[in-house]
Image: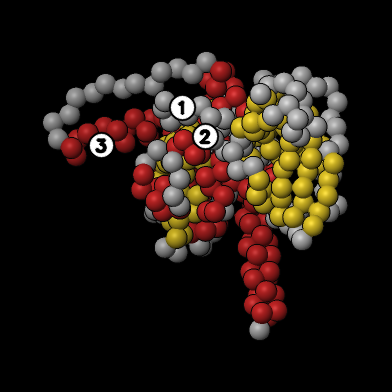
Amino acid sequence: MKQLLHLIFLFTIVSFSQNFEKVDSIVLKYPSFSKEEDLAHQIENDFSTDLEKSRAAFFWLTKNIRYNVKEFYNPRKRGYRFQYASEEEKIQKLQGLKDQLVAETFKNKLGVCEEYAQSFKKICDLLKIEAAVITGYVRIDSREIGKPSNSPNHAWNAVKIDGKWLILDATWAAGSIYNNNWIRKFNDYFFDMPKDKMFKTHFPSDTIWVLRFGRITLEEFYNQPIYSSTFLNLKTTLISPKTGIINLKLSENIELQFTDLDPKSLILYTFSGSRMAQKPLISSKNNITSVIIKNPNTATDLVIYMNNKDALHFKIRTD
């Protein structure tokens, strides 16, 4: 029976993957719509389920909206002032501002996280699919470890499919910044992010979203290592250390421990300022793999690579 259930589970995963491949192939043929209503109308005609429609909206945004690198490095203050006589009028005027933001995004094909998130929400509204914009915190640099931000720095989405919330981030799925340039490269991890891994990368500012998926504080979120989607896509789990700051005595080496690590994985590391990646000492026992790295004898940043891809970031402190 266990084997049968396992096969059914695998078949379900493959089926979903094939469905998304079909959805994505259709959306790739879409024109570069200049109005959100036109995109929503096309999606409504082409797809029947809310899951397919949500995927289509998400995928189109990642392929057609370019990330605004200039805005990322020099963010403008977004403040709006308006008067209202009732709560209803307030909601209407706020929605008007969001609609204007979405309209400009479709026209200019440019935006940061707020534009991606509000655009996805608007398309879902037009398709009558329940969705939300989540604001909160993300970390992308080891310098942020242990230093909680004073205010939210990111926006992403949740969409309700068959009574369950899916978490997705079109901004991070669309591409990434490398050497101050934005590189478009679709990352499927950020569509329906695993609930048990959400707090590795995203922390909502609204308590209701935190309580829906676990129990963690903002301080605990910031004290973690920096996890890349490359690592989170693997079956392995980092079991030690749990914190992103590794305190070492001069006589100690760095030891990382993983469960379910593929023995064929290529593991390398670098310290900040190093030109060459190095191989650590690796040993395994009872499904636990230990990765030993020589003490750098100085405060520095540590980056772990798995199969030549960025996987984990830590801060090293020495006595």
Residue on which disc 1 sits: 149
In this view, the residue in front, 296 or 67, is 296
Label 3 SS: helix
Q: Is residue 48 above or below residue 282?
A: below
Q: Which residue is mark 3?
A: 92
Name the image quarter holding residue 230. top right
Q: Are marks 2 and 1 in contact (CB under 8 Å)?
A: yes
Mark 2 crowdedness (10 Å alpha carbons): few <14, some 14-19, many ≥20: many
Query: Where does residue 213 sit, x and y in percent of width and height?
Result: 45, 53
Per the image, label 1 sits on a secondary structure element best described as: loop
The residue tagged with tag 2: helix, strand or loop? helix
At x 80%, y 32%, the residue is 294
**In the rendered structure, which amino acid carries the disc numbered 1?**
Ser
Q: Mark 2 is on which residue type?
A: Tyr
Instruction: Report the front residue among 171 and 51.
Output: 171
Q: Position of residue 195 (x, y in %)?
A: 52, 53
